[in-house]
Amino acid sequence: MGNKIELDIKENIATLKFIDPENLNPLNKESAKQLLEELESLRERTDVRCIIITGSGRAFSAGGDIKLFKSSIENGTTGKVMDDLTKDLYKIALILRLYPKPIIAAVNGWAVGAGMNLALSCDFIIASERARFRQSFAKLGLIPGFAGTILLSRQLTWQQATEMSFFGDTYSAEELAKLGLVNEIAPPEQLDEVTLQWAERLANGPTLAYARTKKLFFDALSTPLEEHLEHERQMQIKSAETEDYKRGVFALIDKKEPEFIGK
C-alpha cells in the first residue's frame, strides 16, 4: 500500500503531512485509513498538545482520486467504491470537529473537493499565498462531500455556499480569507514558520478548555438554547475545578503568563 502520510513530532506539536505529491495527495481509501489511524493514535498522547495537517508538493490535497472514479465507472462498481471510500472519510470529518486537541490545516497548495473540506474541518486554516481552493464536486455531478453541505451552509451565507458549490470555481487564499474561512495568509517560504507560531501558542494554552469549547460549539448547532445554556453552565463548573483554572487565576493576579498543562 505504501505510506501516504508522514508523522513528525517535535516537542508537543505533531505534524501529519500527505506525501503523495505526484498524485496531488489524494484522499483515497489508503490515505484516509492512515489519517484516521494517526489521529486515533495521537488522541490520548499527553506529549502532543496540537496537531498540524499539511501536504507536500503542489497540493494540500486534491481530494478524490479521479483514476479510481474512472475505473469504478468502467467496472460498474460506482456505488460500492463510493461507499468504501467515504466510510473512513466521514469518520475523519466527525473526529476533527470533536477532536480533543486543536488542529491547524497548513494549506500549502491546491485544496480541492474533499481536500478543501478537510481543511475546513480543522480548527484553523493557515494558507500559503499560493493556496487555491475549489469545491469541485458539481463538476463531477456530485454533492459537496466530506461534510461539505454542513461546513459551507453553516460557515457562509446561503448565497455564498450555493455559488461556491454549484459552480466549482477556484478561490485564492485571499478570497477565502475575506469570507472568514482562512485565519492567516503567509508567503510560501514562511508557511511552516507562521503555522508553527500558531501551533506553539495553542499548545501552550489550556487544551482541556479548548476541547470542551469545541464540543460545546458542536452541540450548540443542534441543541435548544435553554438546554445548551445549562450544559454550558455545568461545563464551566467542571472547568473551574481544573488545575489550569488555578494556574490561570494565580498567573493573572501575579501578572505573569500562565503555564497550562491541559488538566
Image (cartoon, rainbow, N blue to C red):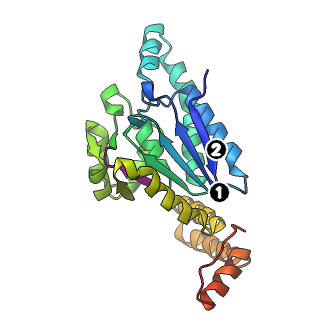
Q: Which mark is residue 243?
A: none
Task: Name the disc covering residue 12, or none.
Answer: 1
Q: Amino acid at mark 2?
A: Leu
Q: Is residue 173 above or below residue 233?
A: above
Instruction: Give left or right: position of 21 versus 216.
Output: left
100 vs 42, nearest the viewer: 42
On whether residue 221 falls in the magenta region, the answer is no
Residue at 34%, 44% (x, y): give it: 131
> Pointer 1: residues within 10 angstroms few (<14), some, or many (20+)?
some
Determine if residue 48 is in view. yes
Q: Is residue 124 visible?
A: no
Badge 2, how many Cα within 10 Å: few under 14, some, many 20+?
some
- Left or right? Give the position of 146 relative to 58: right
Question: In what quadrant of the picture does the N terminus appear?
Answer: top right
Determine the residue located farthest toward the bottom in the rendered image: 253
Number of numbered tags placed on the structure image: 2
Q: Which part of the image, by quadrant, shows the C terminus?
A: bottom right
Where does residue 27 sit, x and y in percent of width and height? 49, 31
Residue 197, image x and y in percent?
49, 61
Look at the picture and state if 47 lies above or below 259: above
Magenta region, residue range = 125-130
Cα separation between marks 2 and 1: 15 Å
- Indicate which disc residue 39 carries: 2
User: Which SS class for mark 1?
Assistant: loop
Q: Is residue 253 left or right of residue 155?
A: right
